[in-house]
Amino acid sequence: MSSGVEKDRFDGLTGEISKLHSLLASGCYGSVYLAELSELIMFLSAAEERSFFDANFEEFRADFIHLLGRYSAIGIAPLRTEKILVAAETFRRFSGSDSGESIDPHTSRIGKELQHLKGILNGSPKFRESGAQGLYFPLIEISGSEIKAGRLDKIEITLTPSKSENQFRILSKYNRADETLPLQIKTSFLNARSQLSLRKDGRSKDYFNVFVSFTGDLGEYSGDSLGAILTLSFMLELYNFYYRQKT
């Protein structure tokens, strides 16, 4: 290979890795980061050298597998998902059996979600009638002050009885420096309780351990626009907690 081609490949590799490091430094760890990892996979695979692939992707291997496991095609442009699936298959081809096989359940699930989404977009009655369960909300991924992408996410809530006071916990691998979200969670929970008229059943003084998580969990969630979806989610969980056993 000529020195000019080697230099071009080195410069291209340096640029791709620098872009990934910049995204991480800015706190961008969602579908945008996964898409960039997919671009790096395709760049490295073009050389058709497994040693070259392994040497330059090793530091990102665990991130790619983790993000693929958290990725959902719902609410994402189909073309982006298709590129990620192609990169996943390429990753499997260049990786050892353990790493390659570990992503098979993820790619299978994502492929089914993609077909479901395409069915909805194409107006298929079959897919309209069997929509995804749960309450979804729109999410904007931001790196620094720049909007990178939009997607859908879902809130998951667990309630367990508490003896003396309400306790609120956000279950995530990321630190929560933003105080707006915890305040929204507490306010929405109290609003949901008042909407269900628990007072007449003598249950308005019940206390709970409130656990909140996000299905994607691909970064730090912040902002003050989750009040409605949180309140509805809490109303459903409280209703199930108190009344589902009676139905």
Image: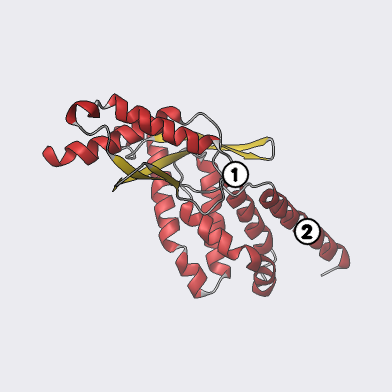
The image's mark for residue 177 is 1
Of residue 138 and residue 75, the one placed in the foreground of this image is 138
**Residue extending furthest toward the right:** 3
Height in image: 68 above or below 238?
below
* Residue 122 visible in this rendered orientation of the protein: no
Quadrant of the rendering where the C terminus is positioned? top left
Percent coordinates x, y for residue 195 in the rendering: 30, 25
Q: Is residue 216 left or right of residue 143?
A: left
Quadrant of the rendering where the N terminus is positioned? bottom right
Which residue is pictured at 36% across the width and 31% down the height?
Answer: 190
Of residue 232 and residue 242, the one placed in the foreground of this image is 242
Which residue is pictured at 37% across the width and 41% down the height?
Answer: 166
Which residue is pictured at 56% across the width and 46% down the height?
Answer: 176
Which residue is pictured at 56% across the width and 59% down the height?
Answer: 64
Of residue 167 and residue 46, the one placed in the foreground of this image is 167
The image's mark for residue 14 is 2
Q: Amino acid at mark 2?
A: Thr
Height in image: 83 above or below 94?
above
Residue 143 sits in which quadrant?
A: top right
Percent coordinates x, y for residue 125 in the rendering: 29, 32
Q: Secondary structure at mark 1?
A: loop
Query: In the image, which is nearer the foreground, mark 2 or mark 1?
Result: 1
Local packing at callout 2 (Cα closer than 10 Å; few below 14, some 14-19, many 20+) is: few
